[in-house]
Amino acid sequence: MKPRDIAAYAFLAVTWGLSFLVLLKVVHAFGWVGAVTLRSLIAGITLFLLAAATRRRLDFSAGWGHVAIVGATTVAAQLIGLSYATPRIGTAMAAILVAAIPLFSMILGQLWGLERITVRGLAGLLLGAAGIVVLVGFPSVPITPSFAFGCAASLFSSFSAAFGSNYANRHLRSAGSFELTGAAFLFGGLMTLPLLLAVPVPAMPRPVDFLYLVLLACVMSALTYVVYFRLVASIGATRTISVEFAVTTIAVLVGTIMLGESLTIIQAFGAVAIIGGCILVLDPFPRRAKAAALPSAPPLV
């Protein structure tokens, strides 16, 4: 990779890895629904303002209905699940379960006829599934209803991200990544907006909380997606999506060092199994370059 590509790769890994910590602060201040709604709306508006500032011509001829479904799954459902789960299971567990996105993506891709599962991919799926069972089944904390619901929400988040990515691959191949991302964020924010009536913002946030929100929306959501899709164009989708492995590693380190979270030895083996399964599924460094129409969506953390 070129130095510029290496810098972009490192930026994505560090930014998304640290975003779990910022997400915790935003959820604490704005609630898990408020965090998703405000983050999505600010990110979407930021991208459209950036497009206007750079005089970028946007094309939405691919259809608003398809974009709305991507917004409902890749943004609304994924972020709702992640924001609900992270405070309940910890950043380390949430980050590791996010790494299951490629596993779900390959299963859906096979069911929809978008790709064919190879022996290597099947081995990765089985290894990753075993890792999830070990990780969730042998936690370092008591298995309470809150923990169980948190794990379920995290897996639902990963499945939603995989579903939205494959749906976009199937129906929105002609759509530009900039248009798709900006509109998906806006749709996702508008869809979760009514939920604020049921789960309102708990109290008036502090000024620093608004700073965390803007950081999460503008830098860790909007800007990272622009960098991500540019990196896809430069080094390819498969090599770019491998950044999820680095994201998970950094998020786990942040959780254990800065937040005092812990993982059992058995869970550590489960985490290694999940990441190893993803490596087999993604094959980030194939011997021969493979073309990809649209990459799997990265974690919107």
Image (cartoon, helix red, strand yellow):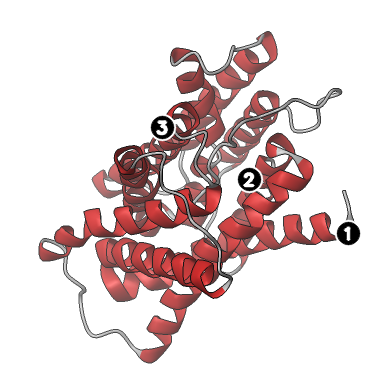
Q: Position of residue 162 (x, y in %)?
A: 46, 34
Q: Position of residue 74 (x, y in %)?
A: 40, 44
Q: Which residue is mark 2?
A: 244
User: Which disc number belongs to residue 199?
Assistant: none
**Amino acid at pointer 2:** Glu
Q: Residues within 10 Å of mark 1 (few under 14, many from 20)?
A: few
Q: Position of residue 14 (x, y in %)?
A: 67, 62
Q: Quadrant of residue 190?
A: bottom left
Q: Is residue 11 visible?
A: yes
Q: Residue at x 63, y 50 (%)?
A: 229
> In terms of sequence position, does the residue under pointer 1 or pointer 2 come before the other?
1
> In terms of sequence position, does the residue under pointer 1 or pointer 3 come before the other?
1
Side of 279 relative to 151 (left or right): right
Depth check, mark 1 against mark 2: the one in front is: 1
Q: Which residue is mark 3?
A: 163
Q: Is residue 256 visible?
A: no
**Amino acid at pointer 1:** Pro
Q: Which residue is mark 1?
A: 3
Q: Circle 2 — which element?
A: helix
What whole-number distance in Å separates the C-alpha atoms at marks 1 and 3? 33 Å
Q: Circle 3 — which element?
A: helix
What whole-number distance in Å separates the C-alpha atoms at marks 1 and 2? 20 Å
Q: Residue at x 41, y 47 (%)?
A: 60
**Amino acid at pointer 3:** Phe
> In terms of sequence position, does the residue under pointer 2 or pointer 3 come before the other?
3
